[in-house]
Amino acid sequence: MTKLNFCLGVCIGLSMTAIIQVFDVTSTFKDFYVRNVSPQRWSNSPYTSCQQKSSSFENPSKKTEEKLMGSRLASFEVDSFHKDNDAIVKNLFKTVRVACWIMTSPSNLDKKAIHVKNTWTKRCNVVVFISSERNDRFPTVGVNASEGRKHLTAKTMQAFEYLYDRHLDDADWFLKADDDTYVIMENLRYFLSGEDPEKPVYFGQRYRPYVKQGYAAGGPGYVISKEALRRYGQRGSQNFSLCRNDSGYEDVEFGRCLEKLGVILKPSLDAQNGTRFHNWTPESYLWAQFPKEFLAYDFENGRAGIENVSDYAIAFHYISPTKMYDLEFFIYHLRPYGILNIPRKLNVVT
């Protein structure tokens, strides 16, 4: 009887151990699924996540940033690593000149703007960082505007006035972007190669309300023609009845200003109706995770999915510092062996 009880106890003990181990594995898997796979992981809108405090991965430590800006970062542009034929790109760089100005602030220079400077803006013909303070080290151009969202209009109006005064003849097109915007300049130049910079036009992600013809959202950036800048510099920059000098929503107020100056906001979809300017991250468009109010604003009704985003997409917004470098790698370095990239004609012929 004693032996039987002993054997029975051993069996029960082993069974309980097995059950506990299975439970632990199941719990671990469930926890992993909820954190990494479950659709609930994507339930927060991009807008909400952008306002929340980012993780240490999204906001790299100073040590991580120093590594990114050190010798490893330099290898991003080492010609010996890249064997692509870039003759078309070099030609467009000369024939479709783009001046880029970046909206930033003194507190964001080392947090955000430096990563924009290290990545995509190197492909602009002219680059100007606009802040409320001049900084010769970075460098930035200081304009007479206070910091804060209420004064983005003042920054924008003065930035375009600065470009008109200093760089009108240095470029054909003038791009405004934020310090968390990522722009694929080659795709922008390809798109603009089919447009006339001497016509009063501009492009971006079109939003509906507030302005009769709509306006271009500020986050993903918008690009105006030389003629549009000329009209602003000659007729709008000092006429506050046409162009507000401060307050209001920056993109709305500049849209109103351009409309009064006879500048047309044109569509930017490609020949397959793919979207090019995007006010959210790439994954937001792949998974259609937008704030509800966005659907009421967007001319394209928040179209998403890989079939609706242009293969020659131009811009994305809310890009964290580390993701700036991720995009640099995936766009300019990673290549599938044996697949040759043949340029496609995706511009709309009008």
Image (cartoon, grey):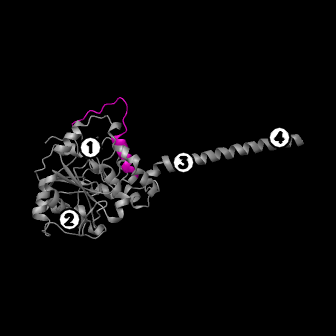
Q: Which circle, 4 or 2, is nearer the viewer?
A: 2
Q: Which residue is mark 1?
A: 274
What whole-number distance in Å separates the C-alpha atoms at marks 3 and 1?
Answer: 35 Å
Tag nearer the camera, 4 or 1:
1
In the structure shown, which secondary structural element does the residue marked by tag 3 occupy? helix
Give the spatial CA distance, label 3 vs label 4. 37 Å
Q: Which residues are magenta?
A: 322-345
Q: Residue shown at 16%/66% (left/top)?
A: 243
Viewer-proximal residue, 260 or 84?
84
Q: Position of residue 320 (x, y in %)?
A: 38, 54
The quarter of the displayed image where residue 146 is located: bottom left
Quadrant containing the C terminus in the rendered view: top left
Location of residue 103 in the rendering, given as x and y in whole percent from the top left corner: 28, 60
Give the residue type that dot 1 points to. Answer: Gly
Which residue does the numbered mark 4 point to in the structure image? 7
The residue identified by callout 3 is 32
Give the camera-side residue of 99 and 23.
99
Say whether marks 3 and 4 touch (CB < 8 Å).
Answer: no
Residue 132: image location, x then y, percent: 28, 67
Please tell me which of labels 3 and 4 falls first in the chain: 4
Q: Nearer the viewer, residue 39 or 169?
A: 169
Neighbourhood count class around disc 1 (C-alpha, 10 Å): few under 14, some 14–19, many 20 upward: many
Q: Residue at x 26, y 54 (%)?
A: 221
User: Which numbered disc covers residue 158?
Assistant: 2
Q: Earlier in the sequence, mark 4 or mark 2?
A: 4
Q: Looking at the image, is mark 2 or mark 3 earlier in the sequence?
A: 3
Residue 16 counted in the magenta span: no
Residue kind at label 4, given as amino acid type: Cys
